[in-house]
Image (spheres, helix red, strand yellow):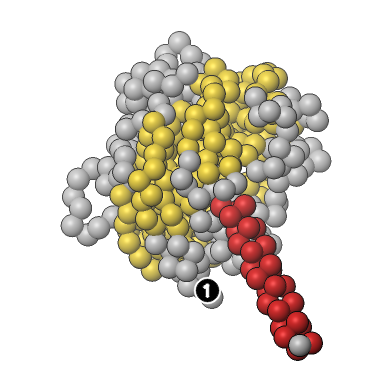
């Protein structure tokens, strides 16, 4: 009788443990994530912006629920967003480039407890069409890249979220493609350790490199000064591998992806592989837009505008080199930015011209993406930034 009682007790404990784990699992999958959406708000000729400003949306972590919460802040063409490491502030570019608009702006907001945005101020980007903004990992500095003018900006970030311009970076160059008449800085990417700033320049086929001084909130050219890609490539965005000293650069104009060995001691980038993001038989217009390395380091994804797909690649665990896996339709037109959710299991894609955000399951064992048939209608979305508490 005693042995039976012990057996029953053990069984109850085991079942309780299983139920607890299942409850925890269900709790995880039902978690609602929040994200801010950048977009275009007016017709610029090449894009018919229809949004009202920065949006905030709710996303079920299992991809089954999407909803538009509110217009968090009215702003003209907030096409790229960044959140400070302390989660207190959001920074948006205001992408202005009409003839009577001499400069765009970086606009600062306080993120309130209810995730509403409170305006702090706007700061000239000293160039037209600011296309990217980023915050240093320490939170001490903010950077912006202007597509027009060959200008990037450096700002000191104050405790209240306001900014002070500390430096203007001017670069020059051109290339053989019709879109390479001059430098077009397209991203301001800080290295994972915060020591360096990298600026992909679509117009000159260069990735400019700078050493970062957080004390003075300034940067200075490194010994290498820049890394190059093939003429006519048009480097646009880049990302770093989470554990290997490898950087990946997406090239907009020739739809390729470059793999670089990265030396964190010197900032040096040495290109060692170039892969195509398109099917061999695809001959229509295409340009790439965004690139992300999966948090587990096993996969790299890039977006194709025209082919309207995400290209997936597997990563060699020792060299960081890429092997093509597959293409997945984004179920929309002109996919710009896309985002992998914090747990690495869902991908959200901002389809600019079809006015929708589409949701994909991501198999972390194979890298495969599967459309969940869930989408959110939202005007002209081009940037998705998660708010992680």
Query: In terms of depth relative to the viewer, which is nearer, 32 or 331?
Result: 32
Q: Can residue 97 be seen in this snapshot?
A: no
From this viewpoint, is residue 32 visible? yes
- What residue appears at the point 38 percent right and 68 percent down from the top-left corner? 323
Residue 287 in the figure: left or right of residue 386 = left
Residue at the top extreme of this rendering: 100
Residue labelled with disc 1: 317
Q: Position of residue 231 (x, y in %)?
A: 36, 50
Give the image quarter of residue 8: bottom right
Q: Quadrant of the N terminus?
A: bottom right
Q: How many marks?
A: 1
Q: Residue at x 56, y 64 (%)?
A: 296
Location of residue 39 with respect to 372 vertically, above or below: above
Q: Residue furthest front?
A: 1
* Residue at 50% across, 50% down: 62
Q: Position of residue 201 (x, y in %)?
A: 47, 42
* Left or right of 352 in this view: 245: right
- Look at the numbered disc 1 and give the secondary structure of its residue: loop
Q: Quadrant of the C terminus?
A: top right
The answer to whether residue 310 is left or right of residue 32 is: left
Which of the 4 quarters of the picture holds residue 262? bottom right
Residue at image location 42% in from the left, 14% down from the top: 99
Give the side of residue 59 with respect to residue 334, left or right.
right
Estimate how packed mark 1 is, as few (under 14), some (14 to 19) or many (20 or more) residues with alpha carbons within 10 Å. Answer: few
Front-lying residue, 279 or 233: 279
In the rendered image, residue 45, in percent from the top left (x then y), is placed at 32, 21
The image position of residue 326, as x and y in percent, is 32, 61
Residue sitting nearer the eye, 259 or 23: 23
């Amino acid at each position: 009788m005693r042995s039976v009682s012990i057996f029953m007790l053990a069984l109850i404990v085991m079942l309780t443990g299983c139920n607890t784990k299942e409850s925890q699992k269900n709790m995880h999958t039902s978690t609602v994530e929040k994200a801010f959406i950048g977009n275009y708000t007016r017709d610029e000729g090449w894009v018919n912006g229809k949004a009202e400003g920065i949006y905030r949306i709710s996303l079920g972590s299992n991809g089954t629920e999407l909803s538009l919460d509110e217009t968090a802040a009215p702003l003209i063409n907030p096409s790229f967003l960044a959140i400070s490491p302390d989660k207190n502030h959001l920074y948006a570019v205001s992408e202005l480039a009409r003839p009577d608009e001499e400069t765009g702006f970086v606009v600062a907001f306080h993120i309130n407890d209810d995730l509403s945005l409170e305006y702090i101020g706007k700061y000239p980007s000293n160039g037209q069409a600011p296309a990217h903004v980023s915050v240093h990992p320490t939170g001490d500095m903010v950077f912006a890249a202007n597509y027009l003018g060959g200008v990037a900006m450096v700002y000191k970030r104050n405790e209240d979220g306001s900014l002070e311009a500390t430096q203007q970076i001017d670069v020059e160059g051109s290339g053989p493609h019709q879109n390479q008449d001059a430098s077009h800085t397209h991203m301001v990417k800080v290295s994972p350790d915060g020591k360096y700033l990298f600026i992909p320049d679509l117009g000159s086929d260069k990735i400019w490199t700078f050493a970062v001084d957080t004390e003075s909130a300034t940067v200075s050219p490194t010994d290498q000064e820049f890394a190059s890609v093939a003429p006519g490539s048009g480097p646009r965005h880049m990302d770093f591998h989470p554990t290997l000293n490898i950087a990946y650069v997406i090239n907009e104009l020739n739809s390729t992806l470059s793999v670089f060995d990265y030396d964190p001691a010197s900032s040096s980038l040495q290109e060692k592989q170039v892969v195509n993001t398109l099917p061999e038989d695809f001959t229509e217009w295409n340009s790439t837009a965004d690139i992300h390395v999966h948090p587990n380091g096993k996969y790299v994804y890039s977006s194709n505008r025209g082919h309207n797909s995400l290209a997936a690649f597997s990563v060699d665990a020792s060299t960081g080199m890429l092997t093509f896996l597959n293409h997945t339709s984004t179920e929309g037109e002109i996919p710009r930015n896309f985002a992998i959710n914090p747990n690495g299991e869902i991908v959200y894609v901002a389809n600019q011209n079809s006015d929708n955000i589409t949701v994909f399951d991501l198999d972390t064992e194979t890298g495969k993406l599967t459309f969940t048939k869930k989408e959110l209608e939202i005007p002209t979305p081009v940037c998705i930034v998660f708010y992680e508490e």
